Image: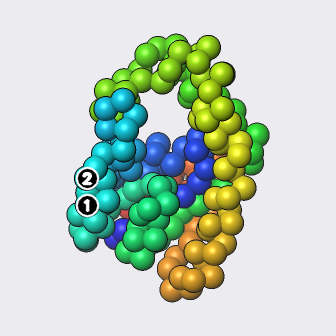
Amino acid sequence: MRILIAGPSGSGKTTFAARLGRLLDIPHTEMDSLHWGPNWTPRPSFEADVQTLIERPAWITEWQYPQVRGRLLERADVVIYLHYSRAVVMWRVVRRTVRRAVTGQRLWADNVEPPLKNILRDPDNMIRYTWRSYPHVGELLAEARGQHLQKRFIEFRTPRAANQFLRAVQLRGVL
C-alpha cells in the first residue's frame, strides 16, 4: 500500500505518517529528508530519490514539494488529509519553530532553524509561509480528488479524529 499524508506545514504530517507506518509496518520516508541538503539547499538528487521511493510497492510519505506532487499522487493508493483549522496549524508551527530555534535541534542534513530574532525578520520564515500557504493545500486536494476518483481520500478535521483513526488502525491492523 502506498499512502500520502497531506496538510499544511505544521499540521503534523510527518508525525502522523511515522505513527501510521509503524502501525501498518509500512516504511515511512520523510520527504524533507529527501529534499534538504546542507545549508538549506535542495538536494540535486531529490526528484530521482522520490522516483526511487514511489516505485516501491509500499510506502508512506508526506505530500509536499510541487515538483513531485503529481508523481506522488499518481502512485498513491490512499491520501489522508489533515485538514485542521488554521488556528491549530498556526499554534503547532509556531510551537515547533520556536522549540527548534531555542534548542538548536538538528534537522535534515544537519540544518538548524535560524535564531528567533532572524526568524521574525525573515519575510519567508516558516510561520509566515504557513499562514500564506494554508488555503492552497485545500485547493490542491479538491483538485486532486476531482482528478483521481478511484483513489481513497480520508479527511480529518481535528487532531482528535486523526488520533481516533490511528487507534482504530492499531486495533484492526488495517486502514
The residue depicted at 62 percent of the width and 27 percent of the height is 122
How would you rate the neighbour count of disc 1 (Cα within 10 Å): few for under 14, some for 14-19, many for 20 or more? few
Task: Give the percent coordinates (x, y) of residue 99.
Answer: 54, 20
Q: Are marks 2 and 1 in contact (CB under 8 Å)?
A: yes
Looking at the rendered structure, the kind of residue marked 2 is: Ser
Q: Is residue 96 above or below residue 58?
A: above
* Residue at image mark 1: 48
Front residue of 166/127: it is 127
**Displayed quadrant of residue 165:** bottom right
**Displayed quadrant of residue 131:** top right
The residue depicted at 69 percent of the width and 50 percent of the height is 134
Q: In which quarter of the image is the C terminus?
A: bottom left
* Residue at image mark 2: 45
Mark identifier at residue 152: none
Q: In this view, does 88 lie above or below 164?
A: above
Element under disc 2? loop
Task: Give the percent coordinates (x, y) of residue 153.
Answer: 56, 72
Q: Is residue 34 above or below residue 128?
A: below
Residue 158, visible in the rendered structure: no
Q: Is residue 115 left or right of residue 122?
A: left
The residue depicted at 36 percent of the width and 29 percent of the height is 39
Q: In which quarter of the image is the N terminus?
A: bottom left
Task: Give the percent coordinates (x, y) of residue 156.
Answer: 64, 58
Residue 94, visible in the rendered structure: yes
Element under disc 1? helix
Task: Give the percent coordinates (x, y) of residue 135.
Answer: 72, 55
Looking at the rendered structure, the kind of residue marked 1 is: Ala
